[in-house]
Structure formats: C-alpha cells, structure tokens
Image (tube, rainbow, N blue to C red):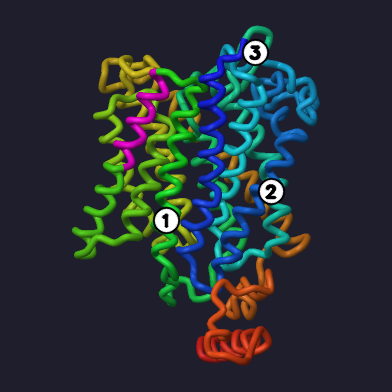
Amino acid sequence: MVNTGDTAWILTSAALVLLMVPGLALFYGGMVRAKSVLNMMMMSFGALGLISVLWVVYGYSFAFGDDVGGGLLGSPGEFFGLRGLMEDTTGEAGGLPVMAFVGFQAVFAVITVALISGAIADRAKFSAWMVFVGAWASIVYFPVAHWVFDFDADGHTGGWIANDLAAIDFAGGTAVHINAGAAGLALALVLGKRRGFGRDPMRPHNLPLVMIGAGLLWFGWFGFNAGSALAANNTAAVVWVNTLVATGAAMLGWLLVEKIRDGHSTSLGAASGVVAGLVAITPSCSAVSPIGAIVIGVIAGVLCALAVGLKFRFGYDDSLDVVGVHLVGGLLGTILIGFLATADAPAAVDGLFYGGGFDQLWKQIIGAVAVLGYSFLLTLVIGFVIHKVMGFRISEEDEVAGIDNVEHAESAYDFVSLGGGGGAASLAGQAHAEARNTEGATKP
C-alpha cells in the first residue's frame, strides 16, 4: 500500500532539488563576467535537459539495476526506458512508489553534472560541453551512483561502497561533490587557463545574483539532504536541523577567515561559505549530532575559504572554485564522519571521538579516494578525447570578445539599446573591437 505522506515528501524533495539547478545557474552566472553569464547559465540548463532524458532511457538502470559485476554497475537493460516501473508501488522504502524514487534520483544526477561547469567558465564550447555531459554521466556518474546509493535488498544486489565497504554517504558527499570536484579539476587541466588568469581581476559581475543563487541552493538543499531519508520521519527531521546549523556555521567560518585575512567580510564569502557548509554536511547529516554538524560546518568554512587560493599556487584555473568548495568540502564531510559520527544519530555508528575506533574512518577514506581517483582519471580521458576530436575550447579572440555573443548570439545586458541606435550589429562590432584592442594591449 502506498504511503501517501512519504510519497508527498519525496516528490516535494525532488522538486526542491530541481530548484537547485536554476539556483546554481544564478550562483555561477553572477560570479562570472557580464559577457559570460548566459553561457554559464546555459551549461546548467543544458545538463538539466540532457540528463533528464538519459536517466529515463538507461541511467536509472545503470545506477539501480541489479548488479552485474562486483558492485560496479547495474544491469544496463533491466529498467531500459523505465519499463515495468510505472505500476510498482513497493519502492525503495516500504510504501514509496518506485517512480517517486526515480524522479528524486534523476535530479541528483542533473545537479552533479551541472556543478562541474563552474570549473571551466568563460572558455568551453557549448556543443562540446553537451557531448561531455552525456559521456561523463554515462561513464562516471551512473556507475558511481550505483556504488554509493544502491543498497542490497531482497533479491537485489547493489553497489560496493554502500554494501561491501559500508561507508556512510547519506546524500552524496562522494557520488555528488567529490565526484564533481575531481571532474572539475581534470577538465580545468584539459582546457587550460583563461586568458588573463592570475593577471586580470575577473571579478563577479553581479553579486545580488550570487546571493539569490546561494539562497535558492540552501532552500533546495533541504530536499537534497532531508529527502534522502526517503520518508517523512525522525531521520529527515534530524538531517534537516543538521543541514541548517552546519551551513550557518560554515558561513560564519568563511567570513571570519576573510575578516582576519583581508580586513573585511564579503557577500561573495557569505554565499561561498553557505555552499561549503551544504557540501560538507551532505554525507554526514545522518551520522552526527547537531554539535558535530556545527564542528563540520566551521571546519569546512575555514578550510574551503583557504583552499580556493590553491589554484593560484598550483596554477590550475578552476574558474568558480569547484575544487576548493566541492572537492575539498566533500572530502572533509566524508572523512570527518570517521571522527564525529555518534551512535545517537540515525546512522547509529560511533566514530573515533565517540569510542568507535578507526573502523569507520578507514571506510570513509577508501570510499572518498576511490571516487576521487575514478572520476579524475576518467574525466581526463573523456575531456582529452572531446578536445582532440571536436575542440573543447573557444579561441582566445572569441574568449576576449565574450562567449555569450560567440556561442549563443545573445547578450545578457543590452546596454546599446539604452542609448538608442546601433543595435545588435553595433554591439557585435564593439565586442570584436574590444577583442582586437585587448589582444594588442596584452601581447608581449
């Protein structure tokens, strides 16, 4: 019999996670320069469209079909096109229709792929990005989702991290954030640095958009985390509170670092701290107490604030700090479970600080490193092949002129029309003139 309350909660949570995609588009869109905002937002929307289709056709089967070998991949054809699932009301948890779970997991796949786009802002061809989206989801995300999210059940065998290793990842610290962060680093290395990286300011063009986007992400994340309980129950309530408090603590930690280091706390820092806290609490929200969540939040806020500067030290151009926030935050949240987990929390496991020894800690480390290595290496291969076959990066001249005009024949802000005359042709002419002038001024 269908549990209508749980079903309503999971469908609501799925809608909240879906809202995170335009939230991410606003967050990323505000952080880039004005000539790149539409392309940045289109990368999120493009992922939303393509992954939605691939998930129904074969992605769900790859991730949640019966295991076909060592906990690495679900049966590709078991649920092809979601056949046989429309009338199944037994579900992943008692009384939850399978199609509700299908929809909930679909938006997880979407947001994971969209997160990667922030690492390659300003310089990726949209067509190449869309090819990457389909390839990466199929080769990397769908299998990793099977590893982490597919649990054994009566007559069903799931993934190795969830079952054989028994690492805790309640809502996607490994499958979503470490996965996307490692992929972002690999893709940034394949595409290379933006023109002017480390020399030009490249400041966010619209901080109100960044703040709105961060707010929508925080709002939607309650569906992301608390919805992963797959029921309207005590676990969802504990997770909800832990998500709230860890995020607030991370924002405060990030702002404190800015105040001590730079002498002022910024709106961009507040928004970034919010996301860092959300990332870190994602895997651990069912395993720690609210005090543990505060500790995780503060650590994530401080260390992620410091980690975003690593790209200048090591010379990789992670445009919007996907590595510093999602990879570092995901690693912190996943590994700190081994220290701060308490049997009083819904996951009912004690970490090192609660007398549980090193057992859970080594499991967390193995799960994190396995996903990081798999994602990084496979993304390098996928990105390199696309780059060689069709070219992944726009030309330097087009990059200076603005990727919005070059890739989409649009501009986010039509300043020319405010002054009258000129029109699109004048705008394009100004962009190309700017490109030529900038090129001439910056060449040695």
Q: Nearer the viewer, residue 426 or 398?
A: 426
Residue receiving disc 3: 90
**Main secondary-structure element of the magenta-colored stretch:** helix
Mark 2 and mark 3: span between their CA atoms? 29 Å
Rendered image: mark on residue 49: 2
Q: For the residue labelled by badge 3, is the local secondary structure a helix, a strand or a loop? A: loop
Q: Nearer the viewer, residue 406 or 398?
A: 406
Q: Residue at x 59, y 22 (%)?
A: 160
**Circle 3: residue type:** Thr
Residue 407 location in percent, x, y? 68, 70
- Asked if residue 154 shows in the view, the reply is yes
Compared across the picture, whether 278 is left or right of 53 comes to: left
Residue 384 location in percent, x, y? 69, 56
Mark 1 and mark 3: span between their CA atoms? 39 Å
- In the image, the segment drawn in magenta is 234-247
Residue 321 location in percent, x, y? 45, 56
**Circle 1: residue type:** Ile
Q: For the residue labelled by badge 2, is the local secondary structure a helix, a strand or a loop? A: helix
Query: Is the N terminus in the top left, top right, bottom left or bottom right quadrant?
Result: top right
Residue 247 location in percent, x, y? 33, 41
Residue receiving disc 1: 212
Mark 2 and mark 1: span between their CA atoms? 23 Å
Residue 389, above or below 83: below
**Circle 2: residue type:** Gly
Q: Residue at x 50, y 51 (%)?
A: 23
Q: Residue furthest top?
A: 154
Mark sitting earlier along the chain (1/3):
3
